[in-house]
């Protein structure tokens, strides 16, 4: 069973469209994250939820809206897509808020290409 | 905030030893992690340090000096499959346990 699964794996769309990426984890973790990795491989945190509560919200355009219906799911909706949104979006989860050796477990990534 | 620096690229020979350095500045240090990321794949956990000293896991070791804001990842007996990007990440207890990643070091292992 995949621990952190994201769908879709690939997404190609036109500028101005709205799209969503879904993430589910079956590890029983309390905290989930969205990271963005651009073409230069920089991995930047976007959002984090702990037990459905938003706890980290980096400087991200408000076109990006995360939603956590329960602690096992964290979805990302993007409105009015722009060329600069093209990247690989990684979902990750961690047990607790981050203490001890609790590590991030990443999904396989969703590669978004905006044309 | 956090500032994490790593070399952008390194090259080493199969069978050799390579050390990848990471320096950081953070207001609420609560652990340093190393992740490995092969091209087109997700990052995977390699090692964790929260106290000063060396942590060894097989061919990989990681060292931490909190007073110097410095860590390194040591890879021994390099294999071709070790060619990957190595990401240093620092966790900050003042910001909901956020982990901030360095820009990664791309290691190329040559025969």
Image (spheres, helix red, strand yellow):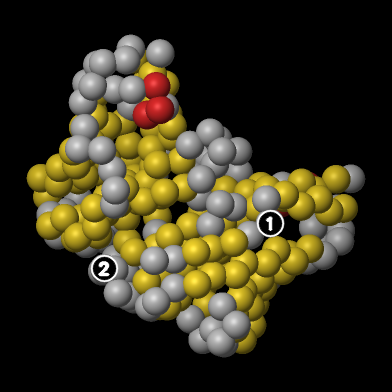
Badge 1 element: loop
Work out which quarter of the rendered image holds the C terminus of chain B and state it.
top right
Residue drawn at 48 percent across, 81 percent down: B50
In the image, residue A7 lies at what x, y percent?
31, 31
Determine whether A32 is above or below B32 in the image.
above
Answer yes or no: is residue A101 visible: no
In the image, residue A1 lies at what x, y percent?
35, 45
Task: Estimate the spatial distance between the alpha carbons at disc 2 and disc 1, rounded to whole Å.
Answer: 28 Å
Neighbour tally class for label 1: few under 14, some 14-19, many 20 plus, Cα within 10 Å: some
| Of the pair B84 and B71, the residue shown nearer to us | B71
Residue drawn at 85 percent across, 45 percent down: B110
| Residue B88 as seen in the image, left or right of residue A21 | right
| Of the pair A52 and A16, the residue shown nearer to us | A16
First in sequence: mark 2 or mark 1? 1
Neighbour tally class for label 2: few under 14, some 14-19, many 20 plus, Cα within 10 Å: some
| Of the pair A75 and B29, the residue shown nearer to us | B29
* Mark closer to the observer (2, 1): 1
Answer yes or no: is residue A41 visible: yes
Quadrant for residue A98, please give it.
bottom left
In the image, residue B108 lies at what x, y percent?
76, 46
Determine whether B69 is above or below B20 in the image.
below
| Residue B19 as seen in the image, left or right of residue A27 | right
Residue assigned mark 2 = B96
Residue assigned mark 1 = B7
Residue drawn at 37 percent across, 46 percent down: A35
């Amino acid at each position: 069973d995949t621990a952190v699964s994201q769908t879709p794996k690939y997404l190609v769309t036109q500028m101005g469209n709205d799209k969503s990426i879904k993430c589910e984890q079956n590890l029983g973790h309390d905290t989930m994250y969205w990271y963005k990795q651009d073409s230069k491989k920089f991995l930047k945190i976007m959002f984090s939820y702990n037990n459905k509560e938003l706890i980290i919200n980096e400087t991200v355009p408000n076109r990006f809206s995360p939603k956590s219906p329960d602690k096992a799911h964290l979805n990302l909706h993007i409105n009015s897509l722009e060329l600069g949104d093209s990247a690989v979006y990684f979902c990750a989860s961690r047990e607790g808020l981050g203490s001890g050796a609790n590590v991030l477990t990443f999904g396989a990534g969703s590669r978004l290409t905006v044309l | 905030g956090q500032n994490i620096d790593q070399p952008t690229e390194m090259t080493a020979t199969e069978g050799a030893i390579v050390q990848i350095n990471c320096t950081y500045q953070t207001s609420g240090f609560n652990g340093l992690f190393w992740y490995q990321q092969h091209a087109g794949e997700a990052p995977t956990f390699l090692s964790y340090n929260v106290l000063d000293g060396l942590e060894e896991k097989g061919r990989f070791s990681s060292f931490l000096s909190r007073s110097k804001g410095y860590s390194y990842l040591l890879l021994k007996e390099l294999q071709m499959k070790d060619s990957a990007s190595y990401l240093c990440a620092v966790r900050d207890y003042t910001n909901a346990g956020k982990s901030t990643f360095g820009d990664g070091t791309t290691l190329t292992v040559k025969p």
